[in-house]
Amino acid sequence: MLRVLGRVTSINVRKVVWALDELALGYEREDWGLPFRDPKVPEFLALNPNGQVPVLVENGFVLWESNAILIYLAEREGALLPEQLELRAMALQWLGWQAAELNPPWGYAVNALLRKTPGYDDPAKVADSMSRWTSKMEILEAALAGANTGYIGAGFSIADIALGLSVHRWMSIPADKKEFPAVADYYERLLSREAGARWMGPETP
């Protein structure tokens, strides 16, 4: 049985469980990460020395980093990635872009407006975070507007799981935002998937 270590309030944990549900793979999930269980304890650090979630465990095999887990699951099951090399590379491009380019700008705004984290109360920094985030969303809007599959690439893939969760966070943020019609259509399409609706619920922004 596959084990997923991580709290579902983590967007990176939700990437993994969404993929597992799409693949109809059985798994057990254990809450790790504050406020549940501290991942900095020796037991967890022996699995992931970074002390971060998620971690995938299967028998003696241990894997961390959410995108690596997504690729492993897709390769293992022969699904959620295109077979053609160029299309596969494009899906992996967007998967990497989600983590490296789309996610970092939102940090301050999400902590200030969604999580209400103490210390994140500088209006100028919130505005800067939203501005940089909007610029990245403009890139996604242009890509989706030019697509003819309804998804970011040749069809639904692990890239859409990662991007969908990021879009969900954009849709959930209580702020004045630029409208992105193609992104909105994409979001509704992902929500129409059973696993998408499960992991992009209102309680998990």
Image (cartoon, rainbow, N blue to C red):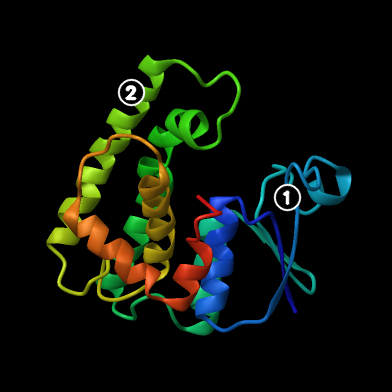
In the rendering, at what x and y percent does residue 131 appear?
Answer: 28, 29
In the rendering, at what x and y percent does residue 178 appear?
Answer: 21, 40
Mark 1 secondary-structure assignment:
loop
Type of amino acid under label 2: Ala
Residue bearing the label numbered 1 = 48
Q: Residue sitting at 36 percent across and 69 percent down?
A: 190
Type of amino acid under label 1: Asn
Vertical order, 22 against 99 (above or below):
below
In the rendering, at what x and y percent does residue 156 appear?
Answer: 34, 74
Q: Is residue 169 left or right of residue 15?
A: left
Vertical order, 188 against 64 (above or below):
below
How many labels were placed on the picture? Answer: 2
Q: Residue sitting at 41 percent across and 47 percent down?
A: 172
Mark 1: few/some/many CA within 10 Å (<14, 14-19, 20+): many
Q: In this view, does 187 lie to the left or right of 138?
A: right
Q: Residue sitting at 37 percent across and 65 percent down?
A: 160
Nearest to the observer: residue 168 or residue 53: 168
Vertical order, 100 against 95 (above or below):
above
Query: Sequence-wise, which precedes: disc 1 or disc 2?
Result: 1
Residue bearing the label numbered 2 = 127
Vertical order, 153 against 32 (above or below):
below
Q: Which corner quadrant of the image does residue 182 belong to?
A: bottom left
**Mark linked to residue 70:** none
